[in-house]
């Protein structure tokens, strides 16, 4: 999925770039992730690294400042991010199973003309993967109905247009086949990346920026489709990308699983059986590179989850319900296990580490009601590809 190969030439005479770690000894950080950080710091063009408590192998959960552009640092899901919408639904009227049944309408579909219309309305070329617009994808992507259970800072929440008891829609997705096709063109490059003035660098950044816009539009269309299925209205609260490259002073800031923090609000996603949060970045530490954690972060890799979840049918079936009384729509049984709540770190621990580091304050606490991932089984999904 675009993880770095770190067997390249490194700076020979200079000291490694500084790594600023915004997590304490209590954070669950795998050694492999920190080894990868150290190798990144040895790349000649890298100037500074910020690592957050959601850090896991990839590395994911990092912001990297470099004099060069490194497509491998971002990988194939360019523009992946999270968007939160306020709905017109009433929390006390929610029926999780009914909502889950309706959200099955979100299953991946191909509608060329509708996709082209969405792209035109956003000022994007209509031949830019129109069939994929409005689709969630696999992996850790989802569309989730949540309730805003707490507002630790009611004034900030009010200014964001939300209040305790609101029903929210939380969408996590990226650039789908578009990002993959862009990355494929640059996959042969080593981790050392491309110089700033190179024509190929310019071309990559042009396509990269289109993919970031495409991904944001995709999340909006997913929300519109969900709203139609749930028979409600939606209003944007925050749109936050966490896989992208931006100009940052005279260098390039690469965020891989690190949310932009030069904004008013940032979503922090928990697992499908955990709290998620809305954060207010403090912006008071330049060593954080205007970035924050984007979620809980993986605790265990996908392959190992099949050995960590008991194979009894009753145990596997229980994965479609949550301790909050919610429902999970995921007909792909392998994905259901690989994305089980146990695969992720404790989102409250990640939040606390960010607060202790004075990088953010908590504005809202959300609890899951229904998580939609896929209404198609693994064999059907493979056939779809």
Image (tube, grey):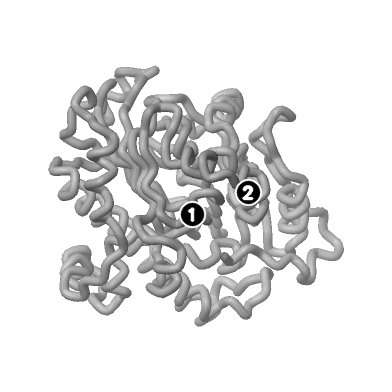
Instruction: Give the quadrant of residue 74.
Output: bottom right
Decide: few, some or many residues near mark 1? Use Cα within 10 Å; few <14, some 14-19, many ≥20: some
Residue drawn at point x = 35 percent, y = 48 percent: 372
Where does the C terminus fall, quadrant-wise? bottom left
Image x and y of residue 53, in percent = 62, 37
Residue under label 2: 305
Of the two numbered discs 1 and 2 in the rendering, the one whose residue sits closer to the viewer: 1
Residue under label 1: 333
Instruction: Give the quadrant of residue 26.
Output: top right
Q: Residue 17, can we see it?
A: yes
Residue 121 in the figure: left or right of residue 242: left
Where does the N terminus fall, quadrant-wise? bottom right
Image x and y of residue 6, in percent = 74, 65
From the viewer's side, name the closer residue of 226 and 63.
Answer: 226
From the viewer's side, name the closer residue of 79 and 205.
Answer: 79
For label 2, the SS is helix
């Amino acid at each position: 999925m675009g993880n770095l190969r770190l067997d390249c030439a490194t700076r020979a005479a200079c000291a490694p770039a500084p790594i600023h770690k915004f997590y304490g000894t209590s954070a669950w950080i795998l050694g492999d992730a920190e080894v990868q950080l150290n190798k990144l710091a040895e790349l000649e063009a890298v100037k500074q690294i910020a690592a957050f408590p959601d850090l896991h192998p990839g590395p994911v959960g990092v912001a990297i400042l470099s004099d060069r552009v490194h497509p491998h640092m971002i990988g194939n899901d360019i523009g992946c991010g999270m968007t939160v919408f306020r709905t017109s639904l009433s929390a006390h009227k929610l029926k999780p199973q009914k909502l889950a049944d309706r959200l099955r309408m979100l299953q991946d579909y191909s509608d060329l003309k509708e996709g082209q219309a969405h792209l035109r309305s956003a000022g994007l070329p209509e031949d830019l993967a129109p069939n994929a617009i409005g689709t969630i994808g696999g992996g850790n992507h989802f569309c989730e109905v949540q309730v805003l259970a707490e507002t630790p800072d009611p004034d900030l929440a009010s200014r964001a247009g939300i209040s305790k008891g609101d029903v929210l829609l939380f969408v996590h997705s990226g650039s789908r086949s578009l990002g993959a096709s862009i990355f494929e063109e640059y996959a042969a490059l080593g981790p050392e990346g491309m110089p700033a003035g190179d024509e190929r660098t310019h071309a990559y950044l042009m396509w990269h920026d289109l993919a970031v816009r495409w991904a944001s539009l995709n999340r909006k269309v997913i929300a519109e489709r969900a709203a139609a299925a749930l028979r409600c209205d939606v209003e944007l609260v925050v749109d936050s990308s966490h896989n992208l490259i931006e100009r940052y002073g005279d260098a390039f800031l690469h965020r891989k699983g690190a949310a932009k923090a030069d904004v008013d609000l940032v979503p922090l996603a928990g697992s499908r059986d955990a709290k998620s949060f809305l954060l207010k970045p403090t912006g008071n530490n330049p060593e954080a590179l205007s970035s924050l954690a984007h979620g809980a972060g993986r605790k265990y890799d996908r392959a190992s989850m099949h050995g960590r979840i008991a194979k009894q049918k009753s145990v596997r079936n229980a994965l479609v319900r949550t301790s909050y009384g919610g429902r999970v729509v995921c007909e792909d049984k392998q994905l259901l296990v690989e994305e089980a709540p146990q695969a992720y770190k404790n989102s409250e621990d990640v939040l606390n580490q960010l607060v202790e580091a004075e990088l953010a304050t908590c504005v809202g606490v959300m609890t899951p009601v229904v998580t939609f991932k896929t209404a198609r089984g693994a064999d059907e999904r493979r056939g779809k590809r």
